[in-house]
Image (cartoon, rainbow, N blue to C red):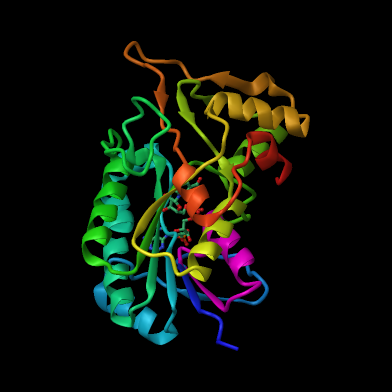
Amino acid sequence: MSTPKKILIVGGSGFVGTQLAKYLSRKYPVVCTYRNDFTPVPGVDHVGFNGIQDKDRCTSLTQHHHPDVVVFAAGSNDPGKAEKESAQSQLIHLTGANQMLTATEYLKAKYIYLSSDWVFSGMEGNFAESDTAIPFHALGKTKLGAENYIRSRSLNHIIVRCAPLLGRGTLDHPSWLDRLREAAAFQKPVALSDRSIHNPVHVRELSTLIERVIEGDVRNKTLHLGGLTRISEFDLAMEIFKKFGFDSKGLSRLKAGSDSTFQDYSLNTTQTLKLLKTEPLFLEQSLDLL
Ligand SMILES: NC(=O)c1ccc[n+]([C@@H]2O[C@H](COP(=O)([O-])OP(=O)(O)OC[C@H]3O[C@@H](n4cnc5c(N)ncnc54)[C@H](OP(=O)(O)O)[C@@H]3O)[C@@H](O)[C@H]2O)c1
């Protein structure tokens, strides 16, 4: 029997990283990096790492753990945060991702980069992998910069553009859903956009995709991950409140600016489903997994 592949998750203490670690550790040895705090996951090793922008420290991390697969799950998917803290956002999503790629290349390991639907313009929606990405937001621009660098440098990579991912985070790294539930529990007001459309999906789908990519040794592809339902943030929150029986009194629509039009960032996932032989999920199915 061959030895199971070893996985290193950079940003493994975050919402997505923790969910991936829980799932993948059933089958593979998993090491996660954290910078500040982490919630222990049985069978998973956590290592402190605060050198994402430093090539030598990235190299010594990978040389020490010798992974077969590196998943880059550091950073945040909040476009507002990327706009406000643009230098920090570039440092993680672009410089950090690039340094970690170089460190991964020395080992000839597979590099999996988590990108986002924010790389698209939001003009039409249902974006396929072959569509030209023209980002309007700082987060999308930074993610696209990293994608282009990875494509031009790596011979063994996968880029996964994810729609918003639904699931429970941890106390130290709550997910969007956790923050929404907390607001509901403490009756805090929440204003959300009803003009920005995505096709969210449960985070388990990302874990399944990564497992299939590793098992099938799929390489040098950009894959889209999302659900079958296109919905605004506001309507999604309403669905979640209904599902959990929360009072939606505190929920309101974000006031639209005078130039605000509908933007659809939804991803077409046909190619991914065909390649990995997976079934797409409707929103109700993703909510049932929560
Ligand atoms: N959540 C989604 O719906 C979604 C959708 C599409 C794509 N993604 C992508 O998935 C990735 C993870 O998102 P998330 O929701 O899991 O975010 P998160 O919960 O905020 O976790 C972020 C992780 O990155 C680490 N990190 C942040 N800055 C760092 C730095 N300078 N050096 C080293 N590590 C650093 C954090 O560690 P510390 O907290 O200890 O600093 C944490 O482990 C992001 O790249 C995001 O764009 C997420």
Q: Quadrant of ligand 1?
A: bottom left
Q: Is residue 254 above or below residue 91?
A: above
Residue 92, image x, y percentages: 33, 57
Which quadrant of the figure contains the C terminus? top right
For residue 187, say whether it is visible: no
Query: Residue at image x 30%, y 63%?
Result: 96
Examine the structure image and report whether residue 32 is included in the region drawn in magenta.
yes
Viewer-nearest residue: 63 or 120: 120
Q: In this view, does 168 lie to the left or right of 37?
A: right
Q: Residue at x 49, y 74 (%)?
A: 7
Please give the name of the residue rendered at 61% of the width and 53% of the height, measured from the top-left corner: 204
Residue 3 x %, y %:
55, 86
Tell me: residue 134, above or below residue 147.
above
Q: In which quarter of the image is residue 26?
A: bottom right
Is residue 264 at least partly visible in the picture? yes
**In the rendered structure, does residue 235 fall within the stretch colored magenta?**
no
Magenta stretch bounds: 10-33
Left-right relation of 123 to 12: left
